[in-house]
Image (spheres, rainbow, N blue to C red):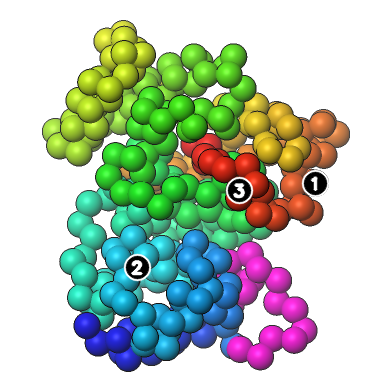
Amino acid sequence: MNLPALAAYLKSRRDRVRPDDVGLPTGPRRRVPGLRREEVAQLAGLSADYYTELERGRSAQPSAQVLAALARALRLGGDERDHLFHLAERPLPTAAYGLTAHAQPALLGLLDRLGTTPAQVITDLHETLAQNELAAALVGRPPAVSGPAASLVYRWFTDPAARAIYPSGEHPQHSRAFVADLQAVAARRGRDTFVARMVTSLRRRSEEFAALWDTHDVALRRNDHKRIVHPALGVIEVDCHSLFSEDGRQRLLWFTAPPGTRGAAQLELLSVIGTQDMAAENAPREERT
């Protein structure tokens, strides 16, 4: 692997991204044309020290997950992302699943403009591809995993911690909604081996999933009114809106609350307190999809 070339490429891409492109304040004391190293690390979910070493050409070979996270943080296009993988001597991501999937530019462009409301881009299998800081503060950052476990639907039925985002009394309705949505997605994808293996695994591991799957209920999860359990602000009532990509494989989600409601006040407070390491104080946290 050509570490100096990789380091130079990362720095050139970092210099190109303006803070307001990713929802960060510009501030009067910036000494760099683009993002700071620590800002790239934060956006990619990496430690500042690790990213600094990577940009200095001293780090060990980054994983495909790390490269995909950097591609999202640096807003790389398809050719630029592929070049990043080539420099790191990693196979190009070919499957549109998990953390190696790439958010579609149109949805990512809209996400960049939603700086005052929680928003994120997910796949139709509920894998988080990108999110703004308010979404991270509201629902937590997704775990750095790949394969079926990158899907919230999969974790919902295999990891009890994934359900902490919703009040326990509402878990059954979310289970039904997740399964009905997956039924629709599986049919639209046709003979998709990844989805087929995911369903087979879920049927084996979760009696609840198997029973709901056998009802054959179908309904894409579009707009919802839901209650999210936040570790500092308590239960927040929000409306969740969805915008689907043209091929239906990705969705832009954003969360709002009617003006004058308690939920609106909580979301406004959320923009003030931000993440503030609450994920560490209240781990584990899950994203909402």
Residue positioned 42% across, 88% down in the render: 56
Mark 2 burial class by Cα count in 10 Å: few <14, some 14-19, many 20+: many
Q: Residues within 10 Å of mark 1 (few under 14, many from 20)?
A: few
- Mark 1 or mark 2: which comes first in sequence? 2
Measured as percent of width and height from the top left, residue 41 is found at 51, 70
The type of residue carrying mark 2 is: Leu
Which residue lies under the disc numbered 3? 279
Q: Is residue 4 left or right of residue 135?
A: left
In the displayed structure image, the side of residue 173 where residue 248 appears, left or right? left
Where the N terminus falls, by quadrant?
bottom left
> Of helix, strand and loop, which one carries label 2?
helix
Q: Earlier in the sequence, mark 3 or mark 1?
A: 1
Q: What is the three-letter code of the residue carrying label 3?
A: Ala
Distance of mark 3 from mark 1, alpha carbons? 17 Å
Residue at (32, 84) in percent of width and height: 6
Give percent across and percent down for residue 206: 31, 19
Per the image, the residue denoted by label 1 is: 269
Nearer mark to the viewer, of 3 and 1? 3
Give left or right: position of 216 versus 11. Answer: left
Of residues 196 and 161, the one nearer the viewer is 161
The residues bearing labels 1 and 2 have C-alpha atoms spaced at a distance of 33 Å
Q: Position of residue 285 (x, y in %)?
A: 55, 41
- Verify whether residue 24 appears in magenta: yes
Going by the numbered disc 1, the residue's amino acid type is: Leu
Q: Which residues are magenta?
A: 16-32
- Which residue in the protein does label 2 denote? 67
Element marked by disc 3: helix
